[in-house]
Image (tube, rainbow, N blue to C red):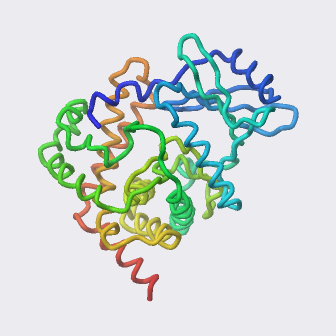
Amino acid sequence: MRADDIQGQFAPPQIALGRIRAVLAEQYGLEGDLAPLAGEREQNLLLGGGPAGKRHVVKIFRRADAPGAIAFQTRALGYLAQSLPDLPLPRVHRTRSGAAIHTLQDPENGPCDFRVLDYLEGQPVELGEAPTPALAAAAGQLVGAVTRTLGALSHDFGAEVIAWDVANGLLGDAQFWAMGGGDIRALEAHMRPRFAALMPVLRRQRTHVVYNDAHLENLLRPAPDADRITGLIDFGDMWRAPVVCDVATLALGFAEGAQDAPGMAAAAVSGYHAAYPLSGAEIDLIEDVMIARQVLSVILYDIKLADPALQSDENTQMRARLMERLERLLALPWGRITAAIHAILKKGAD
């Protein structure tokens, strides 16, 4: 992937609400209040207030942005529902005719893939009290089970590339680093060669379709202080990638804001490893990939903020948090997280 491939990955369609309501009524027999939800490549809305009281998520994707991507995601969700029926994952709500995807023809966006998913109740872990090691391990077990199951699927839609794939090569690209702010560019001389050397190592690791987005906003729990996970949402970044990238994203989510970052990362990895055993080589790469994912995130937010349409207090604050948390991770002695992971896995094996 090249830096200029990123352009357009953060511009979802904007279909008028009246048009969306008409599709929901005609194709799905659904009605209610629509409220916008955040989305990078899809127009997302929450449908609520209908007579049955059940809520749904409406997702609209411009097909030209990645032909076949939504068909693949929908097939994967169906496969997960069949293979892991007891896990709390989104379910596809079909049209009256039984279709999983409705094609919406729009004069400005062309054909759009229109889907409705059942809404998963719960509170994002990010918004509650500080996660405990027990919660991190529970999240790891869920994400590990999902990615283990996704390994049976082929990734069959063209040559699309996604920005959030750590193995996409962007972190070794000087043009990509040039899109970042001054604080992150100050790390380039030290880190870009390191990441360039990491890429071929990553590509030799076990690779298949992975969930790829296990940050704390996508993990749900029933209450702000709960130690159990009741939902996993947002499968839009599901992708064929090294398994270590999947578990590293999870570990990063629990480590980046924690007082004991190594301990929380290790707890998350222990849960994942229990559901989907990792090799020694994968375990030893997790810390490197965690840092890579955080650097990637900071620069991608800089790219967002360079677009006037994406400039917002929310994105500015998120970028600041990402950079602050990266600095905290880099302040740890290198290898501390890896040592904590090995220690907890050894304890579990004894």
Instruction: Specify whether 309 is left or right of 144.
Output: left
Residue 258, given in percent of the width and then of the height, sits at 42, 58
What number of labels is visible?
0
How far across and how far down the image is residue 239, in percent? 45, 47
At 83% across and 31% down in the image, what residue appears? 50
Task: State whether residue 54 is above or below residue 106.
Answer: below
Q: Could you tell whether 166 is left or right of 31 in the image?
A: left
Name the residue: 16% across, 40% down: 186
Quadrant of the image occupied by residue 246: bottom left
**In the figure, residue 22 lies in which quadrant?**
top right
- Between 185 and 84, the one nearer to me in the picture: 84
The residue at 70%/47% (across/down) is: 121
Q: Can residue 223 be seen from the camera position used here?
A: no
In this rendered view, identify the residue nearer to me: 97 or 249.
97
**Residue 37: x, y in percent?**
59, 31
Asked whether 186 or 175 is in front, the reply is 175
Q: Quadrant of the N terminus?
A: top left
**Residue reaching furthest to the right:** 51
Image position of 39 (left or right of 2): right
Quarter of the image for the C terminus: give it: bottom left
x then y, percent, for residue 14: 56, 19
Q: Is residue 274 above or below residue 184?
A: below
Residue 83 in the figure: left or right of residue 133: right
